[in-house]
């Protein structure tokens, strides 16, 4: 039983490819006997012939992978392409630390925890790379006798 012509006509009417045309297995004989476009149109209206849904690419795996990356996974040696400096440049690391240190120094000067002369001294030390972090800078300042307001020594 040949239904290639019927599939071709149905594909044209449904506006899809021949591979997406579905013919109800119970009515294959009636469809095979149809020769006119009107007959095929009637079968489509009756629901004997339908267009299968378009298959898309599933995003499930991609979403799972993204969730893992957000948790900090999938960053091992096999994933890395590029040097440590290319992935997190020294300059960016420096900019992040120096900006945060300068922001803290500015706040300390504004609330009069340190005098402008002390501010200048610590600013230049920070610029010279004396402090690893804000915590390190604060601990050094505490050793030199600077007392912080709010008791966060």
Image (cartoon, rainbow, N blue to C red):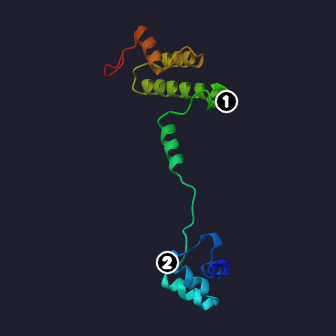
| Disc 1 + disc 2, Cβ < 8 Å | no
Residue placed farthest to the front in the image? 1
Q: Position of residue 38 (x, y in %)?
A: 60, 91
Q: The C terminus lies in which quarter of the figure?
A: top left
Q: Earlier in the sequence, mark 1 or mark 2?
A: 2
Graded by Cα atoms within 10 Å as few (under 14), some (14 to 19) or many (20 or more), the crowding at tag 2 reads: few
Give the distance between the C-alpha atoms of the residues marked 1 and 2, in whole angstroms.
64 Å
Q: Position of residue 51 (x, y in %)?
A: 56, 74
Number of labelled discs?
Answer: 2
Disc 1 is placed on an element classified as helix
Nearer-the-camera pick, 59 or 35: 35
Residue to which mark 1 is pinned = 86
Nearer-the-camera pick, 121 or 11: 11
Residue 31 in which image quadrant: bottom right
Residue 19 in which image quadrant: bottom right
Disc 2 is placed on an element classified as helix
- Position above or below: 40 against 107: below
| Left or right: where 144 falls relative to 99 | left
The nearer-to-camera label among 1 and 2 is 2
In the picture, the disc for residue 102 is none
Residue to which mark 2 is pinned = 26
Residue placed farthest to the left in the image? 150
Whether residue 17 is visible: no
Identified at 45% across, 24% down, the residue is: 109
Q: Position of residue 5 (x, y in %)?
A: 67, 81
Graded by Cα atoms within 10 Å as few (under 14), some (14 to 19) or many (20 or more), the crowding at tag 1 reads: few
Nearer-the-camera pick, 128 or 106: 128
Residue 88 in which image quadrant: top right
Q: The N terminus lies in which quarter of the figure?
A: bottom right
């Amino acid at each position: 039983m040949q239904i290639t012509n019927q599939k071709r006509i149905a594909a044209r009417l449904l506006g899809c490819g021949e591979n997406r045309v579905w013919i109800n297995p119970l009515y294959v004989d009636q469809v095979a006997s149809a020769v006119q476009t009107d007959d095929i149109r009637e079968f489509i209206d009756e629901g004997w012939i339908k267009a299968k849904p378009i298959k898309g690419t599933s995003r499930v795996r991609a979403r799972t992978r993204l969730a893992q990356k957000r948790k900090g996974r999938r960053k091992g040696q096999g994933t890395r392409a590029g040097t440590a400096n290319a992935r997190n440049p020294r300059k960016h690391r420096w900019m992040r630390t120096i900006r945060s240190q300068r922001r803290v120094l500015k706040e300390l000067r504004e609330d009069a925890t340190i005098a402008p002369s002390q501010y200048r001294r610590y600013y230049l030390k920070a610029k010279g790379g004396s402090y690893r972090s804000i915590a390190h800078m604060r601990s050094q300042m505490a050793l030199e006798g600077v007392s912080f307001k709010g008791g966060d020594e």
